[in-house]
Amino acid sequence: MRHLISPLDFSVDETEELLLLAEDIAKDPKKYSKVCEGKKIATLFYEPSTRTRLSFEAAMLNLGGSVLGFSSADSSSAAKGESVADTIRVISSYADIAAMRHPKEGAPYVASLHSTIPVINAGDGGHQHPTQTLTDLLTIHSLKGRLDHLTIGLCGDLKFGRTVHSLINALVRYTGIKFVLISPEELRVPTYIRKDVLEDKNVPYKEVESLEEAMPELDILYMTRVQKERFFNEEDYIRLKDRYILDAAKMHFAGPEMLVLHPLPRVNEISVEVDKDPRAVYFKQAQFGVYARMALIMTLLELSL
């Protein structure tokens, strides 16, 4: 039995296999419509979510399985003080696989230690978001045809953004990756990511504050929102939330092949006028998320056609 707690839980070769499976699913989803008949996924979401929770549920339903779970801590026994360990022990007798989102870093890992079914980390605090990373990798792999020799610009909240942290961890394993880290000083990538991941693996990167300055050299621009729920001080949030707004004028600085990704939800960091630009692929990215999670469920449950 395997879990997915970190994007590094799968090797590069295993990730490639999963992405190829997801791409095959994308070509003909109906072919996979009965793979999970009789199987159930429990979606244990202690934090609000739209795309991640519903894409897990859509993924299992598309595979012919069924869904149970809760969408907030208030609607679970966590409100009564039940521990994550006890919850997963119980859920293990109800479902075949579980996806957990939790505000505390490490909670899905704790769950995996007490579970008798595969546990998927659907986001833990500001730490990791491995299924979003699989979605991001699938989007890039499908639209660019490769995951190597790319210059990736990460823009916005690089301090608290778990999607950013997971994506960096995943991409440093590929040849020829360069990062341009675009953020105000207060929201820079944490020191442990900079030193223990980028510098330790000799991955080229630079930190800049100007989005326009960075755009001409990018193959991928990964925008993020400034996350109000991660701030302790609302004044700091208000001061920083509109620092980067991608609009049609700024898109003129980008090359014709650059792709804009965003894990969503967006607030106002991408103007709606950018949606019409063919380089804006964040809604395609959301669709790829269903295919990535379908492939992941099949892989963890060791199912095939």
Image (spheres, rainbow, N blue to C red):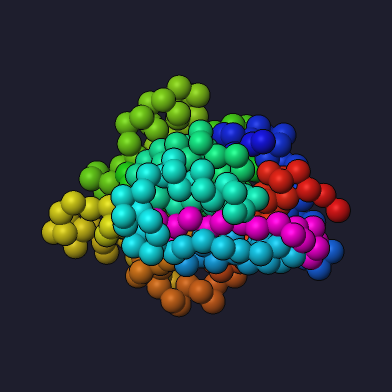
Nearest the eye: 48 or 212: 48
Q: Position of residue 230 (x, y in %)?
A: 28, 52
Image quadrant occupied by the N terminus: top right
Q: Picture coordinates of residue 131 (x, y %)?
A: 56, 50
**Would you say residue 6 sits in the magenta stretch?**
no
- Magenta-drawn stretch, dominant element (helix, strand or loop): loop
Residue 253 shown left or right of residue 67 in the figure: left
Q: Is residue 231 left or right of residue 183?
A: left
Determine the residue located farthest toward the top in the rendered image. 200
Residue stretch in magenta: 32-49
Q: Is residue 104 left or right of residue 304?
A: left
Residue at image location 28% in from the left, 46% down from the top: 187
Residue 43 lies in the magenta-colored region: yes
Instruction: Return the residue nearer the eye: 237 or 183.
Output: 237
In this orientation, does residue 83 appear? Answer: yes
Measuring from the top left, give residue 151's x and y in whole percent.
Answer: 53, 43
